[in-house]
Amino acid sequence: MSSFQEFESSPSKDMINTGLNNTITNLTPSLNFSSASSSSTISATTTSSSPPSTPSRYENQKRRDWNTFGQYLRNHRPPLSLSRCSGAHVLEFLRYLDQFGKTKVHTHLCPFFGHPNPPAPCPCPLRQAWGSLDALIGRLRAAFEENGGKPEANPFGARAVRLYLREVRDSQAKARGISYEKKKRKRPPQPPSSNATTQ
């Protein structure tokens, strides 16, 4: 096994519930319900301790992406361990995902090439949108390091992956007639400084 954590299945609801029940059982004997003042103290202490927070949507998606990539490596022929995964394997994975894409990318021969809103259907292929791939790589890059991978060995941060994403962005922008340029944030006007020097 490699030095970092390989893909693991998430704990079942039964395991989580058992853990919570054990925690509650262990706390119960120390509680004293004999007087009103102690019960108010108990309610204050129990409400102040926050319940286990649910993972954010981003964290859930990152875990699903990590497990999907792990499944891809296990199904790879020959099967591939994460420690031997390179940027080339990440590119294979991204190309594999194209078959599940929902974004129409017009070919050069298509009459709608460069049109953002084509007036009729065409036989051009469906692909993964650049934005989806870019976000996916960001989540997988973070998950790799959270699972013990070294940043310098992160296959999701490989130069080949960055170049591929740039190429996909540029080709889809031309084919779909959409600009992917980052919008510059408008800074709110700064109020005049009230720290004017007085003489």
Image (cartoon, helix red, strand yellow):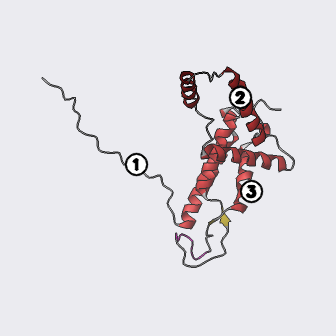
Q: Which is more N-terminal, label 1 or label 3? A: 3
Q: Residue 185 vs residue 161: left or right?
A: left
Mark 3–mark 1 distance (CA, rounded to whole Å): 35 Å
Q: What secondary structure is marked by label 3?
A: helix
Tell me the residue that label 2 is attached to: 23
- Which residue lies at the image location 63% right of the left edge and 35% below the top edge? 52
Q: Earlier in the sequence, mark 2 or mark 1?
A: 2
Residues at marks 2 and 3 touching, judged by CB atoms closer than 8 Å: no
Instruction: Give the residue at the far bottom of this rendering.
Output: 120
Tell me the residue at 70%/29% (across/down): 24
Q: Residue at x 49, y 60 (%)?
A: 179
Query: Which of the 4 image quadrants contains residue 9?
Result: top right
| Cβ atoms under marks 2 and 1 closer than 8 Å | no
In which quadrant of the rendered image does the N terminus lie? top right
Question: Which quadrant would the C terminus be assigned to in this image?
Answer: top left
Residue 23: x percent and y percent? 71, 28
Alpha carbon separation for disc pair 2 and 3: 44 Å
Above or below — where is 112 with respect to 132? below
Image: 95 above or below 67:
below
Residue behind mark 1: 185
Q: Is residue 115 magenta?
A: yes
Marks 2 and 1, Cα distance to the nearest angstrom? Answer: 48 Å
In front of the other: label 2 or label 3? 2
Report the amino acid beneath label 2.
Answer: Thr
Give x and y (percent) for residue 45: 56, 26
Q: Closer to the N terminus: mark 2 or mark 3?
A: 2
Q: What are the residue bounds of the magenta stretch?
A: 110-116
The residue indicated by pointer 3 is 96
Three-letter amino acid code of the residue under disc 1 = Arg
